[in-house]
Image: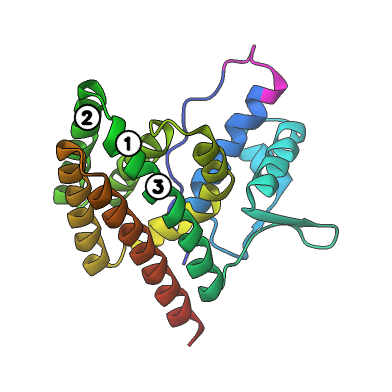
Amino acid sequence: MPQPLPDLPPPPPATESPTAIAQWVAEVLRNRIVKGAYPPGSRLVERRISAELDLSRTPVREALKLLHQDGLIDISRNKGAQVVQCSAEQAVQLFEVIASLESLAAERLARTITPEELDELEELHARMLTFYKVGSNSDYFDTNSEIHDFVVERCGNPVIHDAHKRLIARARYGRFVAIHNPDRLAQSVAEHETLMEALRSGDEAAAAKVWRQHLQHTGESFAAMLEAETR
Protein backbone atom coordinates (compact mmCIF):
# COMPACT_ATOMS: atom_id res chain seq x y z
CA MET A 1 0.00 0.00 0.00
CA PRO A 2 1.50 3.39 -1.00
CA GLN A 3 2.74 5.54 1.87
CA PRO A 4 2.13 9.31 2.23
CA LEU A 5 4.44 11.54 0.22
CA PRO A 6 7.50 12.61 2.21
CA ASP A 7 8.08 16.33 2.68
CA LEU A 8 9.84 18.03 -0.21
CA PRO A 9 13.43 19.13 0.37
CA PRO A 10 14.08 22.86 -0.18
CA PRO A 11 13.83 23.58 -3.91
CA PRO A 12 16.92 24.81 -5.76
CA PRO A 13 17.11 28.52 -6.63
CA ALA A 14 15.72 29.42 -10.03
CA THR A 15 19.24 30.40 -11.08
CA GLU A 16 20.58 26.87 -10.56
CA SER A 17 21.85 24.93 -13.55
CA PRO A 18 19.61 22.39 -15.31
CA THR A 19 21.82 19.63 -13.91
CA ALA A 20 21.29 20.83 -10.32
CA ILE A 21 17.53 20.99 -10.84
CA ALA A 22 17.47 17.47 -12.29
CA GLN A 23 19.47 16.24 -9.28
CA TRP A 24 16.95 17.88 -6.94
CA VAL A 25 14.07 16.16 -8.74
CA ALA A 26 15.96 12.87 -8.52
CA GLU A 27 16.38 13.39 -4.76
CA VAL A 28 12.63 13.98 -4.39
CA LEU A 29 11.71 10.88 -6.39
CA ARG A 30 14.41 8.73 -4.78
CA ASN A 31 13.09 9.61 -1.31
CA ARG A 32 9.55 8.73 -2.37
CA ILE A 33 10.66 5.35 -3.72
CA VAL A 34 12.68 4.54 -0.61
CA LYS A 35 9.83 5.47 1.75
CA GLY A 36 7.18 3.59 -0.18
CA ALA A 37 5.20 6.51 -1.61
CA TYR A 38 6.03 5.01 -5.02
CA PRO A 39 5.90 1.26 -4.28
CA PRO A 40 7.55 -1.39 -6.47
CA GLY A 41 5.82 -1.70 -9.84
CA SER A 42 4.30 1.79 -9.77
CA ARG A 43 4.70 4.09 -12.77
CA LEU A 44 6.40 7.47 -12.64
CA VAL A 45 4.64 9.70 -15.16
CA GLU A 46 6.72 12.65 -16.38
CA ARG A 47 3.70 14.86 -17.02
CA ARG A 48 2.26 14.41 -13.53
CA ILE A 49 5.58 14.93 -11.77
CA SER A 50 6.30 18.04 -13.85
CA ALA A 51 2.92 19.52 -12.97
CA GLU A 52 3.28 18.73 -9.27
CA LEU A 53 6.78 20.20 -8.98
CA ASP A 54 5.96 23.10 -11.33
CA LEU A 55 8.85 22.29 -13.65
CA SER A 56 9.25 21.54 -17.31
CA ARG A 57 9.48 17.90 -18.31
CA THR A 58 13.19 18.17 -19.22
CA PRO A 59 14.61 18.06 -15.65
CA VAL A 60 12.12 15.33 -14.76
CA ARG A 61 13.25 13.27 -17.73
CA GLU A 62 16.89 13.74 -16.71
CA ALA A 63 16.05 12.83 -13.11
CA LEU A 64 14.44 9.58 -14.27
CA LYS A 65 17.66 8.73 -16.10
CA LEU A 66 19.57 9.21 -12.83
CA LEU A 67 17.16 6.88 -11.01
CA HIS A 68 17.62 4.34 -13.79
CA GLN A 69 21.38 4.53 -13.25
CA ASP A 70 20.77 3.90 -9.53
CA GLY A 71 18.85 0.74 -10.42
CA LEU A 72 15.67 2.11 -8.82
CA ILE A 73 13.52 2.22 -11.94
CA ASP A 74 13.21 0.52 -15.31
CA ILE A 75 12.47 2.60 -18.39
CA SER A 76 10.82 1.02 -21.41
CA ARG A 77 9.13 2.30 -24.56
CA ASN A 78 5.82 0.62 -23.72
CA LYS A 79 5.50 1.13 -19.97
CA GLY A 80 7.61 4.22 -19.39
CA ALA A 81 9.33 4.51 -16.00
CA GLN A 82 8.44 1.91 -13.37
CA VAL A 83 9.84 1.32 -9.90
CA VAL A 84 11.77 -1.95 -9.93
CA GLN A 85 10.48 -4.98 -8.08
CA CYS A 86 12.83 -7.13 -6.02
CA SER A 87 12.47 -10.83 -5.21
CA ALA A 88 13.30 -12.28 -1.79
CA GLU A 89 16.35 -14.01 -3.27
CA GLN A 90 17.59 -10.79 -4.86
CA ALA A 91 17.13 -8.97 -1.53
CA VAL A 92 19.30 -11.50 0.31
CA GLN A 93 21.96 -11.32 -2.41
CA LEU A 94 22.01 -7.51 -2.38
CA PHE A 95 22.33 -7.25 1.39
CA GLU A 96 25.00 -9.95 1.41
CA VAL A 97 27.21 -7.60 -0.61
CA ILE A 98 26.18 -4.48 1.32
CA ALA A 99 26.98 -6.31 4.58
CA SER A 100 30.46 -7.17 3.35
CA LEU A 101 31.20 -3.59 2.34
CA GLU A 102 29.81 -1.95 5.45
CA SER A 103 31.40 -4.43 7.86
CA LEU A 104 34.80 -3.74 6.30
CA ALA A 105 34.12 -0.01 6.61
CA ALA A 106 33.18 -0.43 10.28
CA GLU A 107 36.35 -2.42 10.94
CA ARG A 108 38.51 0.27 9.37
CA LEU A 109 36.68 3.07 11.17
CA ALA A 110 37.18 1.38 14.55
CA ARG A 111 40.91 1.40 13.81
CA THR A 112 41.17 5.05 12.79
CA ILE A 113 38.26 6.94 14.38
CA THR A 114 39.19 10.29 15.92
CA PRO A 115 37.64 11.78 19.06
CA GLU A 116 35.92 14.36 16.88
CA GLU A 117 34.43 11.71 14.62
CA LEU A 118 33.27 9.70 17.61
CA ASP A 119 31.57 12.81 19.01
CA GLU A 120 29.74 13.27 15.69
CA LEU A 121 28.58 9.67 15.75
CA GLU A 122 27.51 9.92 19.40
CA GLU A 123 25.31 12.88 18.49
CA LEU A 124 23.75 11.04 15.54
CA HIS A 125 23.23 7.92 17.66
CA ALA A 126 21.53 9.90 20.43
CA ARG A 127 19.25 11.61 17.89
CA MET A 128 18.35 8.26 16.34
CA LEU A 129 17.44 6.87 19.77
CA THR A 130 15.19 9.86 20.43
CA PHE A 131 13.28 9.28 17.20
CA TYR A 132 13.02 5.57 18.05
CA LYS A 133 11.57 6.32 21.48
CA VAL A 134 8.93 8.72 20.11
CA GLY A 135 8.01 6.36 17.26
CA SER A 136 8.99 8.65 14.38
CA ASN A 137 9.99 6.01 11.83
CA SER A 138 10.75 8.41 9.00
CA ASP A 139 13.06 10.61 11.10
CA TYR A 140 14.58 7.51 12.69
CA PHE A 141 15.32 6.11 9.24
CA ASP A 142 16.88 9.34 7.97
CA THR A 143 19.22 9.58 10.98
CA ASN A 144 19.96 5.86 10.81
CA SER A 145 20.96 6.31 7.17
CA GLU A 146 23.27 9.19 8.14
CA ILE A 147 25.06 6.83 10.53
CA HIS A 148 25.50 4.15 7.87
CA ASP A 149 26.78 6.72 5.39
CA PHE A 150 29.13 8.18 8.01
CA VAL A 151 30.73 4.79 8.64
CA VAL A 152 31.33 4.25 4.93
CA GLU A 153 32.48 7.79 4.14
CA ARG A 154 34.91 8.05 7.08
CA CYS A 155 36.45 4.59 6.83
CA GLY A 156 39.35 5.91 4.74
CA ASN A 157 38.88 3.65 1.72
CA PRO A 158 37.38 5.38 -1.34
CA VAL A 159 36.97 2.06 -3.15
CA ILE A 160 34.52 0.89 -0.47
CA HIS A 161 32.70 4.22 -0.72
CA ASP A 162 32.39 4.08 -4.51
CA ALA A 163 31.20 0.46 -4.57
CA HIS A 164 28.71 1.15 -1.78
CA LYS A 165 27.35 4.23 -3.53
CA ARG A 166 26.48 2.17 -6.61
CA LEU A 167 24.43 -0.31 -4.56
CA ILE A 168 22.94 1.55 -1.61
CA ALA A 169 20.11 3.26 -3.51
CA ARG A 170 18.57 -0.16 -4.19
CA ALA A 171 19.06 -1.25 -0.57
CA ARG A 172 17.51 1.79 1.13
CA TYR A 173 13.94 0.74 0.33
CA GLY A 174 14.58 -2.63 1.94
CA ARG A 175 16.06 -0.94 5.00
CA PHE A 176 12.99 1.31 5.31
CA VAL A 177 10.60 -1.62 4.95
CA ALA A 178 12.48 -3.66 7.55
CA ILE A 179 12.11 -1.07 10.33
CA HIS A 180 8.31 -1.48 10.16
CA ASN A 181 8.79 -4.87 11.81
CA PRO A 182 8.84 -3.96 15.55
CA ASP A 183 11.02 -6.93 16.48
CA ARG A 184 13.54 -6.13 13.78
CA LEU A 185 13.50 -2.44 14.73
CA ALA A 186 14.34 -3.23 18.37
CA GLN A 187 17.06 -5.64 17.24
CA SER A 188 18.45 -2.98 14.90
CA VAL A 189 18.69 -0.40 17.69
CA ALA A 190 20.57 -2.91 19.86
CA GLU A 191 22.98 -3.61 16.99
CA HIS A 192 23.64 0.10 16.59
CA GLU A 193 24.47 0.34 20.29
CA THR A 194 26.85 -2.61 19.98
CA LEU A 195 28.59 -0.86 17.09
CA MET A 196 28.98 2.28 19.19
CA GLU A 197 30.51 0.23 22.01
CA ALA A 198 33.01 -1.28 19.55
CA LEU A 199 33.92 2.13 18.15
CA ARG A 200 34.32 3.63 21.63
CA SER A 201 36.79 0.89 22.55
CA GLY A 202 38.46 0.67 19.13
CA ASP A 203 37.50 -3.02 18.79
CA GLU A 204 37.88 -3.65 15.06
CA ALA A 205 36.70 -7.27 15.12
CA ALA A 206 33.58 -6.49 17.15
CA ALA A 207 32.69 -3.55 14.89
CA ALA A 208 33.02 -5.69 11.75
CA LYS A 209 31.06 -8.58 13.26
CA VAL A 210 28.05 -6.61 14.48
CA TRP A 211 27.81 -4.51 11.33
CA ARG A 212 27.86 -7.57 9.09
CA GLN A 213 25.15 -9.18 11.23
CA HIS A 214 23.19 -5.92 11.23
CA LEU A 215 22.98 -5.71 7.45
CA GLN A 216 22.39 -9.44 7.02
CA HIS A 217 19.51 -9.30 9.49
CA THR A 218 18.03 -6.38 7.58
CA GLY A 219 18.25 -8.30 4.32
CA GLU A 220 16.64 -11.36 5.89
CA SER A 221 13.81 -9.28 7.36
CA PHE A 222 13.20 -7.55 4.02
CA ALA A 223 13.23 -10.88 2.19
CA ALA A 224 10.74 -12.37 4.65
CA MET A 225 8.38 -9.45 4.06
CA LEU A 226 8.67 -9.88 0.30
CA GLU A 227 7.89 -13.59 0.62
CA ALA A 228 4.86 -12.82 2.80
CA GLU A 229 3.51 -10.47 0.13
CA THR A 230 3.59 -13.22 -2.50
CA ARG A 231 1.64 -15.77 -0.43
Task: Say few, some or many: other residues with alpha carbon within 10 Å of mark 1 (under 14 / 14 to 19 / 20 or more).
Answer: many
Residue tagged by mark 2? Answer: 118
Query: Where does the image place residue 99, in percent across and percent down from the top left?
Result: 42, 56
At a point 46% along the width and 61% down the height, the residue shown is 95
At a point 31% along the width and 63% down the height, the residue shown is 180
Asked whether disc 3 touches disc 1, contact meaning CB atoms under 8 Å apart, the reply is no
Query: What residue type is disc 1 on?
Result: Leu
Numbered tag placed on residue 109 in the rendering: 1
Outermost residue toward the bottom in this view: 231
Secondary structure at badge 1 equals helix
Q: Is residue 24 visible?
A: yes
Real-space CA distance between mark 3 and mark 1, rounded to the nearest whole angstrom? 9 Å
Q: Nearer the viewer, residue 89 or 25?
A: 89
Residue tagged by mark 3? Answer: 104
Q: Is residue 35 visible?
A: no
Query: What residue type is disc 3 on?
Result: Leu
Q: Nearer the viewer, mark 2 or mark 1?
A: 1
Going by the image, does 182 lie left or right of 50? left
Going by the image, does 141 lie left or right of 197? right
Q: Earlier in the sequence, mark 2 or mark 3?
A: 3
Query: What residue type is disc 2 on?
Result: Leu
Range of magenta residues: 13-19
Task: Say few, some or many: other residues with alpha carbon within 10 Å of mark 2 (under 14 / 14 to 19 / 20 or more).
Answer: some
